Image (spheres, grey):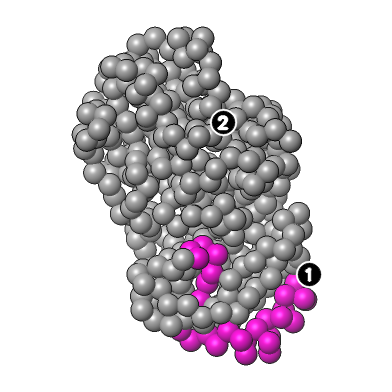
Amino acid sequence: MKKVRTGLDVLINDRNLIDSFNGNVALLCHNASIDSTFTHAALKFNDLFGSRFVKLFGPQHGFTTDTQDNMIETNHYIHSYFKIPVYSLYSETRIPDDNMLEGIDHLFVDLQDIGSRMYTYIYTLTLLLEKCSNKDIEVIVLDRPNPINGLDIEGNILDLKFKSFIGRHPIPVRHGMTIGEVALMHQKFWAKEKTQLKIIKMLYWERDMYFEDTKLPWLLPSPNLARAESTLTFPAIVLFEGTLLSEGRGTTQPLEIVGHPKIESFSYYKNHLINSIEESKLKGFVLRPMTFTPTFDKKNNEVCGGFQVHITNKKTYKPWRVGQFILRELYHHLGSDFEWRSPPFEYNYTQPPIDIINGTDKLRYWVENNDSVEVLETFENLKDYKLQLNEIKIY
């Protein structure tokens, strides 16, 4: 199996392709925007385009990917090395304004997505596409792998009544697209006006690949995803951002673990949870009882009992279903000690954060009513989405 070449690698190794971009160039990127030699895309662009490389943009968590959590914004500044502006698209605005886009002919996007609807980089991209639709700016997406593969689709389709910056479009939780395909999906099905769009495809990526299959280096695309393995637990544990349980922020295993000070994890696991997992018929994972103490964020400096999700078989593991199952179990185990998080969340000041994360209120009712996994599966109505996906697939 050949090592995958990202869109960035394809670009920097094709002189004719580089020379086809005349005029001024800008780049939307972050910490994970590296080539196969670990060289950052901004350094490559500075070498390739020289004085025509005029602006940088950063998504949520910043150009340097060092800013935590939701609604923690980053500032605009002049980069100390490149001597060009770095504009934050998670600041007073999520949409670049006219001043930010002035003097740009080609705006490249090189962002590592993680294949889950709740991850904001795909919405930074689609907002950018919408803003550039009436401008003479070409948007070029340097494609990157979907680290949890491009075959498996899972979860409910977003109800647009719960639209937010962690869910702008009617897609499932595990959407099965590369970020380049998200751009194509946007242009074909969601955009009111088309944008000048080009996708620089990867070489050797196949839809059944997980990130480790690509043989590419992993750099964290956001502060709490230091391991590629975390991208597979993310669709499950991210649900707990809608609660006051800890999802492991402030530990070395964020978004792989969940816990609360009132959980005695070993007795709960042995006396109840192990049987409940068996009854659910969910496969491909183990919940390991543990204790942990977050050093910041929720439950800061409190000893929490909880569980780590260990994936034992990626082919049978269904992260969205597993996450909903764990949420249901802990809701009823904790009783009055369980709390849903209150607004605001991702700039939504009215709707419960769990409903924003889920893209519906029906799953919250499913949890509270202690409904079965069989009922949970009825929320996955994916036929039309799969037909749309087949129309825009480029691999």
Residue 120 inside the magenta-drawn segment: no
Residue 175: image quadrant is: top right
Nearer-N-terminus badge (1/2)? 2
Q: Is residue 326 above or below residue 345?
A: below
Looking at the rendered structure, the secondary structure element under dot 1 is loop
Return the residue found at the far front.
Answer: 37
Residue 276 inside the magenta-drawn segment: yes
Separation of marks 1 and 2 at Cα, in angstroms:
38 Å
In this rendered view, identify the residue nearer to me: 189 or 23.
Answer: 23
Q: Residue at x 44, y 34 (%)?
A: 39
Q: Quadrant of the N terminus?
A: top right
Q: How dense is the environment of label 2, judged by Cα within 10 Å: few (below 14), some, or many (20 and up)?
A: many
Q: Quadrant of the C terminus?
A: top right
Q: Residue at x 41, y 54 (%)?
A: 223
> Which range of residues does the magenta coloring cover?
253-281
Q: Is residue 374 visible?
A: no
Q: Residue at x 59, y 25 (%)?
A: 201
Q: Which residue is mark 2?
A: 6
Residue 197: x, y in percent?
50, 20
Residue 102: image quadrant is: top left
What's the residue type where badge 2 is placed? Answer: Thr
Residue 242: x, y in percent?
46, 65
Front of the two marks 1 and 2? 2
Residue 377: x, y in percent?
72, 60
> Which labelled disc corresponds to residue 281?
1
Residue 358: image quadrant is: bottom right
Q: How many marks?
A: 2
> Which labelled disc corresponds to residue 369?
none
Q: Residue at x 56, y 79 (%)?
A: 290
What's the residue type where badge 1 is placed? Answer: Lys
Left or right, residue 210 beside residue 239: right
